[in-house]
Image (tube, rainbow, N blue to C red):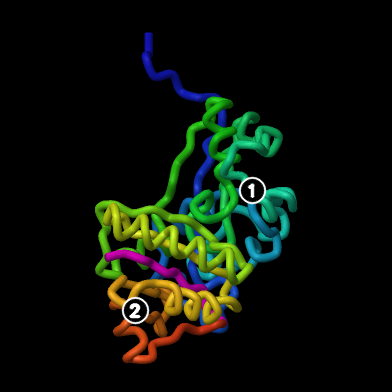
């Protein structure tokens, strides 16, 4: 008896997307994405995505490198519900099993977000969880993950780190949260990684510089995988001396540590 029977279901592929979504500049796809990942994506005809329009644009870029298995307009694209975009799905409250009926019928499916790895700092974990519950094999493909690229380029502790997502938009709550993250980083040595909507990058930076202690280390990474990628890392005092800043039009990742 075969202890590992072949599943009659399709697989769920987690397909990374390039990090240039929403940027004025785009990087050549074959320079930021492995060819093996692009080849798998090109062969998929069924997708779960954040936004069908941006997913078609991504698949169109893939088609310029390797042929798609079916015409672009014939592909089956299911969008995650709006409430998943607004509230997230990382806490397990959304039941995504109904989105995986195609995989249960024996067809491979792709899960994609608008940038980076789906289900990491983006919606999609509910789909992955549902796939495991239904007995559908999950395959994570190789591609860029902004928080790891930012951490690697920061010089901060890469052995112990936490991604904390967004901080509050209200100034007083934002400052309080940043102070909490700094205290934890200084006490434990754990690097704290956070992000913000691009148009708030400079506002967040100013709060960081005004709230953090002069000797606390702060790092930023923007335009990752693009030709204009930029890393800054140093004490808050050094940031102020060199007058480093961030762009309000490009996604940016911030790291706090010691």
Report if residue 251 lies within the magenta region. yes
Give the residue displayed 39% in from the left and 19% down from the top.
Answer: 4
Tag count: 2
Front-lying residue, 136 or 257:
257
> Going 36% across and 67% down the picture, which residue do you hit?
150
Question: Which residue is identified by label 2?
Answer: 236
Which quarter shows the C terminus?
bottom left
Can residue 214 be seen here? yes
Q: CA distance from mark 2 to mark 1?
A: 42 Å
Q: Position of residue 101 (x, y in %)?
A: 68, 33
Question: In this image, 178 relative to 174: left or right?
Answer: left
Vertical side of 188 occupied by 207: above or below: below
Q: Quadrant of the N terminus?
A: top left
Pick whichever, 166 or 120, lies toward us: 166
Secondary structure under tag 2 reads: helix
What range is drawn magenta here?
A: 249-258
Going from the N terminus, do you reach mark 2 or mark 1 first?
A: 1
Quickly name the residue at label 1.
48
Q: Tell me if residue 34 can be seen.
A: no
How crowded pointer 2 is (Cα within 10 Å; few <14, some 14-19, many 20+) is rated as many
The prevailing secondary structure element of the residues shown in magenta is: strand
Q: Picture quarter containing residue 145?
A: bottom left
Tag 1: Cα neighbours inside 10 Å, few (<14), some, or many (≥20)? many
Q: Looking at the picture, does residue 12 appear above or below residue 228?
A: above
Horizontal and vertical percent for residue 19?
Answer: 49, 68
- At 52% from the left and 75% from the top, the residue drawn is 204
């Amino acid at each position: 008896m075969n202890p590992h029977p072949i599943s009659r279901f399709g697989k769920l592929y987690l397909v990374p997307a390039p990090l240039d979504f929403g940027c004025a500049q785009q990087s050549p796809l074959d320079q930021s994405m492995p060819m093996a990942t692009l080849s798998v994506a090109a062969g998929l005809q069924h997708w779960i995505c954040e936004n069908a329009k941006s997913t078609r644009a991504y698949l169109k870029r893939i088609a310029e490198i390797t042929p798609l298995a079916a015409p672009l307009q014939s592909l089956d694209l299911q969008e995650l519900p709006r409430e998943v975009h607004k509230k997230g799905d990382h806490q397990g409250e959304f039941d995504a099993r109904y989105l995986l009926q195609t995989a249960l019928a024996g067809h491979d499916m792709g899960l994609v977000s608008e940038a980076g790895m789906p289900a990491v700092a983006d919606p999609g974990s509910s789909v992955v969880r549902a796939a495991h519950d239904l007995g559908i094999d999950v395959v994570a493909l190789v591609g860029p993950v902004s928080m790891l690229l930012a951490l690697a380029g920061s010089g901060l502790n890469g052995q112990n780190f936490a991604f904390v997502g967004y901080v509050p938009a209200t100034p007083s709550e934002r400052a309080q949260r940043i102070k909490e993250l700094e205290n934890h980083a200084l006490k434990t040595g754990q690097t704290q990684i956070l992000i913000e909507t691009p148009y708030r990058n400079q506002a967040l930076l100013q709060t960081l510089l005004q709230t953090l202690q002069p000797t606390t280390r702060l790092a930023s990474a923007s335009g990752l995988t693009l030709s204009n990628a930029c890393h800054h890392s140093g004490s808050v005092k050094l940031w102020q001396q060199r007058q480093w800043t961030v762009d309000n039009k490009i996604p940016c990742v911030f790291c706090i540590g010691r």
